[in-house]
Image (cartoon, rainbow, N blue to C red):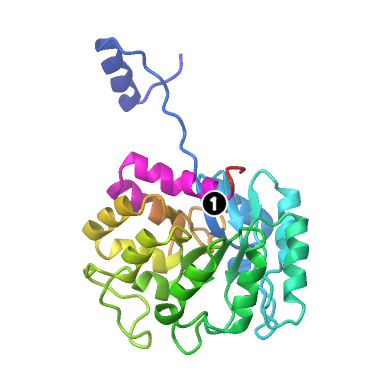
Amino acid sequence: MTAFTRRQFLAVSTAAFCGIKATAAKPRRIIDFHLHIKHYKRDLPATIAHIEGLGCEKAVLLPLEDIAGGVFLTTDEVLDGYRQYPQRVIPFCQVDLRRDDFEKRIRAYAKAGCRGYGEQKQQLPLNDPRITRMLETISEFGWACTFHFQDNKKGFNQGIEEHLEPLLKRFRRVTFIGHAQSWWSHISADVPPPDVSLYPKGPVKPGGLLDRWLAEYDNLYGDMSAGSGYNAFERDEGFAAGFLRRHRKKLLFASDCPCHDGNGLNFKGGCIGRKMIALLDRIADADTLTDIYYNNAARLLGGTL
C-alpha cells in the first residue's frame, strides 16, 4: 500500500466526505525567460540541471557577446545547447553591435533557429544609432528583445527615462522586455540617482514609470529576474501584490541565477529563482501565477514551446 502523508490523507478524506472525487493536483508549468550558460563558470549540463532543479520546463538561454570586454557567451554556443537539449532550451541570439556585420549575423541566426534577441548588454546609450539599427533588423522577425537597463557611468543602455518611450512607439513589432537595476528602480515614482543606489529599498511610491508604461504599451513586458527583480517585489510586498494583479499579462518569470542546480549550489546567496517563486507564491493569486510562470512566455513565443 502506498504511504500517505497526513496532508494527503486529510485531502482525500475530506473529498470523500463531501462526495467529491479526489484528483491529484496538476503540476504547474514554468518557463524561465532569462538564463545563461557559463554564469559563474556553470557549464551546459549544470545549466540544464538548474532548469530542472528549479522545476521549469524550459529556459530562454541568452547569449552575451562583447568584443570590448571579451566574449562571455556566443549565440553559436546557445544554439549548440539547443541542439543537445531541444526539450529544455529556447535559443535567443545577441551580437556585439560594434561589429560592422551585426545585421547580417542577426539574420543568419534567425535562419539558424533563434527565437528572439538578447540580452542586449553593451556599454552603449539607449539612443545609440546602432541600437536603432538592431531594432530595425529584429522587427523583420517580430522578435522580443531583452534589455539590461543600468544607468550608471559603466552601465548599459543608459537613458531609460528619456529614450525608451520613443523606441516603444517607433518599433511596434518589437516586444521590449525590461530587466535589471534601472528598469526595476522605476517601479517607484521615487527613484534615487544611480550613483546613490541601483537597488532602492523601502516602500514604493505609487506612480512609477513602469505602472504607466506597462499599461499603455502592448509591446512592453517586464523580466522579473536577478537581484534587481527580487528586490523590486520584496521591498514592498503590499504594493507588489497590486502591481502583479495589474500587470499579470505583461510580466515574465525569469531567474538570471548563477547557481548550478536550481537549489543554490555554488552561489552563496541561494537560488534567486527559488526565492522569487517563494515570494510570488506568497503574494499572488493562482491565475496571476499561471500567466507569469507560463502563459505570457508562451504568447510571446507564438504559442510554440
Q: For residue 172: magenta?
A: no
Q: Amino acid at mark 1?
A: Leu
Place of residue 240 in the rendered image (x, y in percent of width and height, measured from the top left): 28, 58
Q: Magenta residues?
A: 278-301
Q: For residue 285: magenta?
A: yes
- Residue 268 appears in the rendering: no
Q: Residue at image x 47%, y 90%?
A: 153
SS assignment for the magenta stretch, majority = helix
Taking depth in this image into account, of 96 and 17 the one nearest to the observer is: 96
Sort mark 1 into few (<14), some (14-19) or many (20+) by Cα contacts within 10 Å: some
Q: Is residue 7 left or right of residue 3?
A: left
Place of residue 88 in the rendered image (x, y in percent of width and height, measured from the top left): 64, 47
Image: 147 above or below 33 = below
Image: 28 above or below 268 = above
Taking depth in this image into account, of 72 and 219 the one nearest to the observer is: 219
Taking depth in this image into account, of 295 and 219 the one nearest to the observer is: 219
Secondary structure at badge 1 equals helix
- Residue 245 appears in the rendering: yes
Image: 207 above or below 246 = below
Q: Residue at image x 25%, y 77%?
A: 190
Place of residue 112 in the rendered image (x, y in percent of width and height, measured from the top left): 77, 57
Considering every residue shown, the one lying at the far front of the view is 170
Query: In which image quadrant can residue 272 be found?
Result: bottom left
Write down the residue under mark 1. 300
Query: In which image quadrant can residue 275 be found?
Result: bottom left
